Image (tube, rainbow, N blue to C red):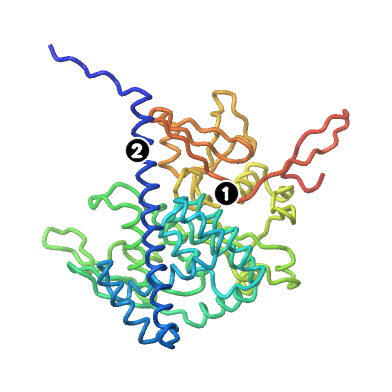
Amino acid sequence: MERTPPPIGERMFAALNDVAHGTVRWVRIGEARRAEAVLALWDAMVADEAADGIEVVQGSRAERAFASHLAGTLGMSRNAAVTLLHTAIAIRGLPRTHRSFRGGEFGWQSVEAVVRHLGALRGEAREQYDEGAAAIATETVPQLVDPELARLHDALDHDAATMNAAAAFRDRRVRARPGVAGEASLTFTGPEADIAAWYEKLRRSAVASHAPDEQHRSVGTLMYDIGLDVGLWGLEHPPVEIDRGPQGALVPADPFERLGDPRVPHRKAIQAEILVMVPAETACGASNRPGTIAGWGSLAAAEVRRLIASARFWTRVETDPVDDAILAFDSAERAIPKALRRLIHLRADRCEEPGCPTGAHLADIDHVIRVEHGGRTTEINLTALCRPGHQTKDDGYVDVERIDGDLHWNTTRWGGHFVTRSRMRIRRRPTPQTDGTDEPAPWDLSA
């Protein structure tokens, strides 16, 4: 008789989780030790050259020779060695971030992002960036750290954000590159708001067109097909002709035509929608404080004002000027459920599943405590979860709870605990009632 193996116990999962965490930490410490070794070699080389009266500067022959030595020692290309050296030197100039990196709180990928977004910050702004970057790198997964660092940098240097936005508009371009195995890539580079709106429109079009078909196309594949159709046929005046094949089946006149003429009457029109948070003083031209695009990053003041000129509607949000906590939310012009939805999107601009990059405005609004279990439709009990994360929660693989505004994601089966911190806080402001009690109403500015 075959025996059923006993279930794996909590202690075993705890031990395996400790091994996994320890491995990640030792990998990070190994990366920190490598950087420290490179800096020690660099300092020794600079001191040795100085003893001979040679000043080592960036791009000098001595640096190039040292990079070649470093490449051979570490088994990498010379260009990669130069990048490693410059990044290590730069991170050493940020004491708080450098200390956290050496302690294994984050790895080299996050270090590269911190240096990439440092820019030309000086003095107090550089010190504030150092403190903020250390916290962001420690609390954010490496794949999501770039938008947070960009937002931090732009908040500290408004002028640089404006110049970068102008440069993005001036240098907008398209590049086509051949790949391998018959693949190629087409890259559009330009202002962030334009790319975000375009991406959202493609995605919404794909979702609207998504249905089982003979090709079993995913949403990503449909995005490609729709984009290709629009690019190839969208500017043509006559519709694309369809010929009948030998068995009478409809055959596209061109093999690239996947979906037909994008202007046909039965196709649903798709309106691109991006969620932009704009400081009032920026909107009226009194400040160059950047805005933000949910799920993307910061947006320079010039780009913010360009969007204002064509925006269909705005929703007023009152925030605390000290810590940006949400104090009130205007719902007078629309129904409460829609206002609550926007409030959740503002609080966390991404899906609140740990490590998920999906924008909150593309995710489901889920009840932390389900309605059938007594959960209420309030901002405390609502969270933005992408469809897979929503299903994972509903299937019982995780227990989710909100504590002090943060979402705690507990994989109780395997002994895991993760915290997704909200980008903005909602601070409840009591509203006096006729019966003498105070009823919190954080989304009503008319009170």
> Between disc 2 and disc 1, whose residue precedes?
2
Task: Reply above or below: 319 against 418.
Answer: below
Which of 382 and 426 lies nearest the eye of the viewer? 426
Q: Residue 348 carries which label?
A: 1
Query: For the residue carrying disc 1, how many other residues have a C-alpha within 10 Å: few (<14), some (14-19), or many (20+)?
Result: many
Give the x, y percent position of residue 42. Answer: 40, 73
Which of 137 and 399 lies nearest the eye of the viewer? 137
Q: Quadrant of residue 23?
A: top left
Which of 49 and 193 lies nearest the eye of the viewer? 49
Q: Is residue 74 visible?
A: yes
Task: Reply above or below: 252 against 20.
Answer: below
Q: Report whether 339 appears left or right of 188.
A: right
x 41%, y 66%: residue: 263
Which mark's residue is nearer the viewer, 2 or 1? Answer: 2
Q: Name the residue under label 2.
A: 19
Give the CA separation, mark 2 to mark 1: 31 Å
The amino acid marked with disc number 1 is: Ala
Task: Reply above or below: 263 against 294.
Answer: below
| Label 2: which secondary element | helix
Give the x, y percent position of residue 81. Answer: 33, 72
Q: Can residue 266 be seen in this view?
A: no
Give the x, y percent position of residue 440. Answer: 76, 36
x 40%, y 82%: residue: 49
